[in-house]
Image: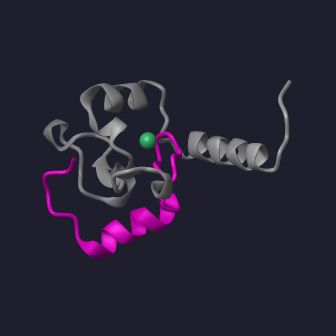
């Protein structure tokens, strides 16, 4: 969880960019028990800035140290990976099978 106050306007930018889904695992907020939160991709304690490119909407799991490290190692939060997962999600929603 972020320690620094994040202005509402910046939170809204991140939330809208993420389309209300976790930007690490794409879990929609509407199917979780707790609201997603704004996460610093590079933690503040490691010099991560409070700016749009270093913020991600995240479900609870990536907010743990293990989740954050895993996300960074697997580069879940790069725009390319997010686009790939969104495409896969849309294909799965359309009923396509990968047998
Ligand atoms: Zn997630």
- For the view shown, which residue lies furthest in the bottom direction? 9
- The chief SS type of the magenta part is loop
Q: Residue at x 48, y 67 (%)?
A: 16
- For the view shown, which residue lies furthest in the front direction? 33
Estimate the x, y position of residue 85 in percent, counting from the top left. Answer: 63, 41
65 in the magenta segment? no
* Vertical order, 73 against 44 (above or below): above
In terms of depth relative to the viewer, which is nearer, 53 or 69? 69
* Left or right of 8, for residue 27: right
Estimate the x, y position of residue 31 in percent, counting from the top left. Answer: 49, 52
Q: Residue at x 36, y 54 (%)?
A: 36
Quadrant where the C terminus lies? top right
* Vertical order, 61 against 94 (above or below): above
Estimate the x, y position of residue 37 in percent, counting from the top left. Answer: 31, 54
Magenta region: which residues? Answer: 1-28
- Split into quadrants, the picture shows ligand 1 in the one at top left
Q: Residue at x 32, y 69 (%)?
A: 10
* Vertical order, 10 against 2 (above or below): below
* Left or right of 74, for residue 2: left
Estimate the x, y position of residue 79 in percent, counting from the top left. Answer: 55, 47
């Amino acid at each position: 969880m972020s320690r620094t106050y994040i202005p509402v306007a910046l939170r809204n930018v991140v939330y809208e960019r993420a389309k209300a889904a976790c930007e690490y695992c794409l879990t929609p907020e509407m199917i979780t028990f707790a609201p997603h939160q704004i996460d610093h991709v590079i933690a503040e304690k490691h010099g991560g800035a409070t700016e749009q490119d270093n913020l991600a909407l995240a479900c609870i799991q990536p907010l743990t140290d293990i989740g954050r490290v895993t996300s960074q190692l697997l580069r879940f939060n790069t725009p390319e990976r997010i686009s790939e997962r969104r495409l896969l999600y849309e294909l799965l929603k359309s009923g396509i099978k990968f047998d």
